[in-house]
Amino acid sequence: MINLVSGLMIAEVAINQKEASGDEAPSSFKDFVDSNLDNQMMGNCVGLTSVFINTCVLAFSITRAGDMLGTNIPGLDSTQGALGFSALLAATLSTQTNVSLSRVTSGAVTCLFATFGALLLPGLASLQDPMAVYATPGTSEGVVDAILTAAPIFVQCAIWQNIAPTVTRLLDYDRTKTLVAMVAGSAIPIIMQFAWSLAVLGGGVDVSVSSGGPVLMGFMVASLVGSSIACGMSIAGELDSLLPSEQSENKDASLSNESAFPLTSSLLAVAPALAAGVVFSGGEGATAALSYAGAYGSPLLYGLLPLALVLIQRNASKNGGDFLEETKSLVPGGMVSMSALAAASVGCVMQQLSSDLGGALSFL
């Protein structure tokens, strides 16, 4: 629900901006801030935060891709696998249009669903007492402790709002299509996670036995490809906005569905994540990066920022600004939902900050 409210707020800003001015809504959060807050320094900070968050996720994907390729291709180690995967990703970003990239990710999602179903359905069918699975005590000291520990990683893994402006533009700023797409984009991952946890904890899916099978391999490849392209698009879009451009048409081209990202932005989008992926290959450092990105970056970028943009845009509309006389809200629940998002974002940051400070003080 939190991701849905956040994504719909971002889409609302993009749609209202398009309806008011006729200009294409920018895909980068930096340009979103520049357009609505008129503060270049704040825009640069937001853009860099977006780059950091998506680089953490992309580094995780490159790490896993390198490990997977190094394990399954004779004569290839994890570092070489990460290099090859990164080179292919950079080439894809710099040569394929937004529409083509969307088609690739759609194909990856189709493969993901097919392989997920093939892995999951036999496992669910073998469960005898599903409710007893979740009633079984775990290894954590308590349910609350377990939730607080895992929450940042789950938050980051469930993030899709980084491509909300691009999805809105690809759907021609249609409110109904955007609402349906984002409701589905929020609900489906939760359902998949719940079903998978139920099957694995209940012993219906033996991952150790299936790890070498083609079905699980297809599932891993589809998830890595889809995640990497989405993060790469987001990073390249932010960098294209942050970096000085000698030719203004490069900026305009980045807003077109029929253009590819510049080569410079594509390479810079992949290189830092590749470096981190090589360093963390074979370890759990990339998982820690996901945790910090989900605990600090995501609540600020996908929680408080969309709320600020929506409120500023609505206030400008009431005061006779550049927007429509009456902006139309996509967010269900209105201010109640937006207030809940703000509270959850602040709470996530404070909880992680408290945990980190407590851990630091324990060493003193």
Image (spheres, helix red, strand yellow):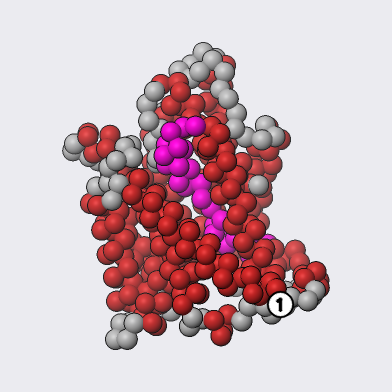
Instruction: Give above or below for 23 relative to 89.
Output: above
Instruction: Give above or below for 142 relative to 335.
Output: below
What segment is highlighted magenta in the picture?
148-174
Whether 169 is among the magenta residues is: yes
Q: Is residue 82 left or right of residue 244?
A: right
Res. 224 image quadrant: bottom left
Q: Quadrant of the C terminus?
A: bottom right
Where residue 264 appears, x then y in whole percent? 23, 51
Residue under label 1:
126
Res. 171 image quadrant: top left
**Label 1 Cα neighbours within 10 Å, binned few <14 / some 14-19 / many ≥20:** some
Regarding residue 47, the answer to whether it shows in the image is: yes
Q: Residue drawn at (40%, 32%), measured in percent from left and top? A: 25
Where residue 160 appears, x then y in whole percent? 51, 50
Q: Is residue 325 left or right of residue 96?
A: right
- Say what secondary structure mark 1 lies in: loop
- The front one of 345 and 266 is 266
Q: Looking at numbered disc 1 in the image, what kind of residue is underneath it?
A: Ser
Q: Residue drawn at (45%, 26%), measured in percent from left and top? A: 17
Instruction: Give above or below for 205 relative to 270.
Output: below
- The front one of 42 and 93 is 93
